[in-house]
Image (cartoon, helix red, strand yellow):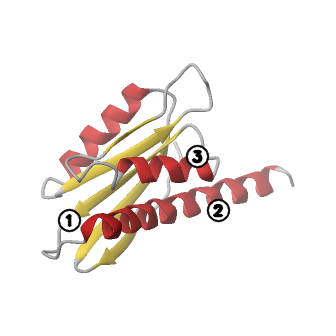
Amino acid sequence: MINIEPQIYIVKKSKFISFIYEINSKEEVKKLNDQLWKDHKKATHICYAYTFFSISQNNGFNDDGEPSGTAGRPMLDLLNKRSVNNVVVFSVRYFGGIKLGGGGLIRAYVKSANLAIDEYLKFKMRNNDSNNR
């Protein structure tokens, strides 16, 4: 399994911690989500999106109680836009006491996911470079 450091993004006192993992099934998504809840018991939300390369498996997302369309869906759109497959990206939110509004939530979750995706792609590029030498 790849080992990407969690990425942290803070906006208006809310902390977003993003994680990205390679996956092969929806069952893995559930197990990872359960583990993150064990590790982050005081988190307000743990939202996620996942994609598969195979057409036979559906992509998906979860807003985990955030207003509909402000967390999981934008992260899924980002994964598709960046053509990243067979991964799940999680964003663990610790509410900081200041509401972000719909647009602010979308920007925060996309930024958080983007940080994890950037690190994942850098990792993949480094490994491909070292394998090609």
Q: Earlier in the sequence, mark 2 or mark 1?
A: 1
Sort mark 2 into few (<14), some (14-19) or many (20+) by Cα contacts within 10 Å.
few
Image quadrant in which the C terminus is located: bottom right
Q: CA distance from mark 2 to mark 1?
A: 27 Å
Q: Taking 85 as reference, is 37 left or right?
A: left
Residue 13 in view here: yes
Residue to which mark 2 is pinned: 122
Question: Label 2 amino acid?
Answer: Lys
Residue drawn at x 41%, y 62% as measured from the top left: 6
Q: Secondary structure at mark 1?
A: strand
Indicate the secondary structure of the residue bearing disc 2: helix
CA separation in Å, label 3 and label 1:
26 Å
Q: Is residue 112 left or right of residue 65?
A: right
Q: Is residue 43 above or below residue 1?
A: below
Q: Please name which of the two marks, 2 or 1, marks the residue nearer to the observer.
A: 1
Residue with the mark numbered 1: 94
- For label 3, count other residues whose C-alpha is less than 10 Å away and answer few (under 14), some (14-19) or many (20+): some
Label 3: which secondary element: helix
Residue linked to disc 3: 80
